[in-house]
Amino acid sequence: MSNTKRRVPISAKMVLLGDSAVGKSSIVLRLTKNSFSEFGESTIGAAYLVTSIETESAVVKFELWDTAGQERYNAIAPMFYRNAAAALVVFDITQRSSLERAKRWIVELQGQPGSTTLVVLVGNKCDCEHLRQVPQDVAEAYAQEVGVQYFETSAKTNTNITEIFQNVAEKLASASTGRGKAKPQPQQTIVVDTNDEPSRGCC
């Protein structure tokens, strides 16, 4: 008799939100292909990708929607985040304005009637410490205030990329199998897209 533990299959819609060029697509590319590109075209509308993460109790199939960050696409964002199991809200630690936009996305996500979306705030490009405009403690304090988890990542150096998705998968699996809270605290996650967002030298 096999001792292999049966893992429950779980499908989970995940959306990535944030300004253009914060590195959403770079994070997904690093996760799914373990690759990084300094330059690439901006996502148009949204890119779709499916990838699976194994946990001790489940195999979580993420249906990833990597949304465009340009303001002209903001109006269609609800089409992608509606009924999402998880959302990664990404900002660039070297651009203070991108954190302000991330805050607005979080308010929008948490304002959905009956929303149970697991929201994770992600500060990307932590390899560019010399260009940092958003202190880590400031981002952490905000995340604690609004009840989401915070992670700092670098798609360029592969920092915390796998960890975010693994963490989110474990939380979703725990909630699904009844071992977790009804509305677990978020963890980092990201979607990979072949259309990498343009970089300003760090990602």
Image (cartoon, rainbow, N blue to C red):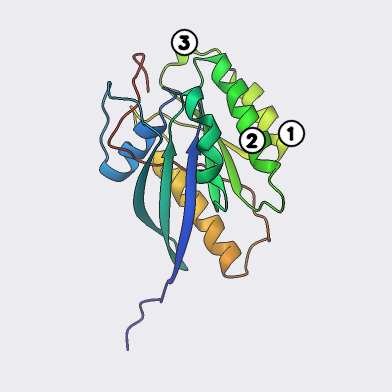
N-term mark: 3 or 1: 3
Q: Nearer the viewer, mark 2 or mark 3?
A: 2
SS at circle 3? helix
**Badge 2 amino acid:** Ile
Q: Nearer the viewer, residue 8 or 113?
A: 113
User: Which quarter of the figure has residue 156?
Assistant: top left
- Which quadrant is home to the N terminus? bottom left
Mark 2, Cα crowd under 10 Å, few <14 / some 14-19 / many 20+, is many
Q: Position of residue 170 (x, y in %)?
A: 51, 57
| 21 sits left or right of 149 in the view | left
Alpha carbon separation for disc pair 2 and 3 = 25 Å
SS at circle 2? helix
Residue found 48% across the figure and 53% down from its top:
13
Q: Position of residue 77 (x, y in %)?
A: 52, 38
Alpha carbon separation for disc pair 1 and 2 = 12 Å
Q: Which mark is residue 189?
A: none
| 133 sits left or right of 183 in the view | left
* Residue placed under numbered mark 2 in the picture: 106
* Residue placed under numbered mark 1 in the picture: 145
Q: Position of residue 108 (x, y in %)?
A: 66, 37
**Badge 3 amino acid:** Leu
Q: Do the residues under discs 2 and 3 have CB atoms within 8 angstroms?
A: no
Q: Nearer the viewer, residue 147 or 110?
A: 110
User: Which quarter of the figure has residue 197?
Assistant: top left
